[in-house]
Image (spheres, rainbow, N blue to C red):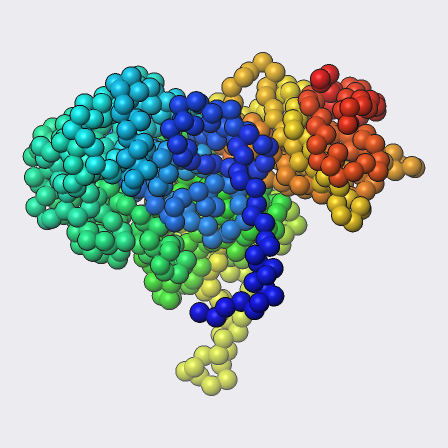
Amino acid sequence: MDLLPEHEQDQSSLSIDPPPFDPLEPSLPVSFPIKDLEYLESRSYFNSFHYSFNISSVPLPSSSSNLPDRPRILVCHDMAGGYIDDKWIQGGTNSEAYSIWHWYLMDVFVYFSHDLVTIPPPCWTNAAHTHGVKVLGTFITEWDEGRLICNQLLATKASAQMYAERLTELAVALGFDGWLINIEVQLDVGQIANMKEFVSHLTQTMHSSIPGSLVIWYDSVTKDGALKWQDQLNENNKPFFDLCDGIFVNYTWKEHYPKLSATAAGERKFDVYMGIDVFGRNTYGGGQWTTNAALDVLKKDDVSAAIFAPGWVYENVTYLVFVCSWWSLVEKSWGILQHYPKALPFYSNFDQGHGYHFSIDGRQVSKDPWCNISCQSFQPILDNSVDLSDNTIQVLVDFKDASYNGGGSIIAKGVLEGTAYFTTKLFQGELPLENLPIHITYSVRSDGRSLVGLSLVFSCNTNERTSVLLASSGETLITMNQFAGKFDKVIMPLRVTKLDAEALRGKGWVIQESSIAMSGYTLTEIHMVCYRSKPELSELRLHQDPTSEGTKLPHASPGYYASLGHVTIKTSEQNLNFPPFTSWVVEGQYISWTKSSSEQSKSLSFKIFWRLRNDHGSLFPKYSIYVSRIVKHAVDGNIEGAKEYLGVARVQAFYVSDLEVPDGVSSLKFIIQVCGIDGACQELDSCPAFLLDVEGGPGGISKTYWGSSPLLKAKSFANKTVFQIQKWGGECWIWTSILKGLEVMKSW
């Protein structure tokens, strides 16, 4: 290996490491593990600046509280130690960051790292809960340090109970569903009683605090304290299995071990999760691209599976292969496990939580690459094994083309001849319908002649299957004739909305709205239907007939290209009325200014948070944050600049970090756009806002003062006089101005 030149070695030796992470100091919100028992015991985590940001915002649906009585799949995350791109709660900048969106193939998700207490970042909990998947954190002890930790953990029965209660408190406060217990150290025989107490007490406190929660034991330590993996459920590890909700069996099992484990478990055979290491380290079947070999054995023997480290695919193959191929092995072996929609309203924009741009209601608000797993909505069930070289209709989630909401849309492209049509399944549901009609809205962007409809499949108690086509706008009679006998019913849209001039030219987003009443039926499938409209004469091109020289025939291009941007299903009773901005209280904390080196601007960091005046709970799943810079003009008064998108919040708080504020800006208006569970977003002019005066501080002060001068608290109301109180180096500076939307409370 080549050495650095001497002068570069000298420079590198003088580099200064960044200061250690201080969870008490305001900064961009992050997720982080707990590394020692003292931090866990003291409840210091709840005093960190980041605690409130780490609370998941999506509860597990009540229909998923109890695990199904069938073989299950547990997926254990192990991606390069964890807490990488996913640690940034408000999102990162890696458009190809690792994530999982195949939630329909699993029942339980474990966030794993090699730290003592691995707390799942809220993005994973939000995405998993959306799809009905439980989320577990990890408690692990290993190596020499783990042995010392166990000595402290198991010192007494009381200590074992106390640490179990601390883990329960974390899960309850942060909104995830339980723990994987991984003790990979040798224990003394005398410590086993307290280890059993730890497992039992954790299970009991979790169950009493979170109905349907899980505690799962990893197959490592035996009933005698030996660190000896059994690779099956047997008398050596069953005493721990009997005290909790399941066992994660080590992955080096033999072919006949699953059947032996099922026999040992008796009626609890589905609580046995046989491990499969995707890296293939002595795992049955070899893992990697033959992971399905182990899955097939487990399915046959009627036990559950624990897939460990699917991140192997991301780490060892190209991103395109990761996206398209590996999870299809799981689906072919075990099939689809999660079904949705199950309840209304149902909304999906097909977002996988990453992309190269970001849109809201058909308008691009950011051109920057991003990642945020919390932005995932219900994921479509697409056939990822399609050969993209085939000359057919190919359907995939695309991130480069325009999106309607978020960063992705479903693209269908290929060839359709004449009156042929193509369908692909998007969702497999279990949605019982009542007396009210359902209203379906979806957005389409196409080349004009490429049309998109939705096919809904319903069933009833008589096993009758009814298919309904929600057709795209067009010629009703031609559409009816084209699909006669192919669907039980064809419904034309009630309303068609073209969003902008691009849509009028056949290139922008078009909103299709339809309605249907199917009382007593269950919606079981949603399909995307691709077809083409009748060609206009202006679209016909002359085509040389190869059989007759000089003869030209009119011919329409068979090319097909269309995007599906979102789907919403709800009843009329579920139409959302957003509270007026006067219903909200908006506050600011930890306001910090820093002068730039050029002296032409300064940067702002602070926490903004909000709540409804008469409701301390959250009625809304998401908030989009914008800022506009206001310049005081001598002639025209205050001039408000364009609204700049800053990011998304899944809790009622957002941290603004190092926002550049050029000289001449007199105030900043932060807008909190409220978004509903049905995907609707409040009009920006009606949203709650926070107005911050920029010109109030004294000029020419040092950078030190700019960085340590907090405006402690502010509240926003309508049409109020601003009173800002700020302390600078022992002196109190007070100023006033008339600004709509802000009232600053006294701070000391």
Left or right side of 607 for 637: right
- Nearest to the observer: residue 491 or residue 322: 322
Residue 457: x, y in percent? 33, 39
Numbered-mark total:
0
Corner quadrant of residue 386? bottom left
Corner quadrant of residue 389? bottom left
Picture residue at 68% right of the left edge, 22% below the top = 713
Location of the N terminus by quadrant is: bottom left
Left or right side of 105 for 3: right
| Residue 286 versus residue 54 in the image, above or below | below
- Nearest to the observer: residue 308 or residue 498: 308
Picture residue at 45% right of the left edge, 46% below the top = 84
| Any part of residue 684 in sight | no
Picture residue at 63% right of the left edge, 36% below the top = 656
Left or right side of 222 for 682: right
- Nearest to the observer: residue 740 or residue 219: 219
Location of the C terminus by quadrant is: top right
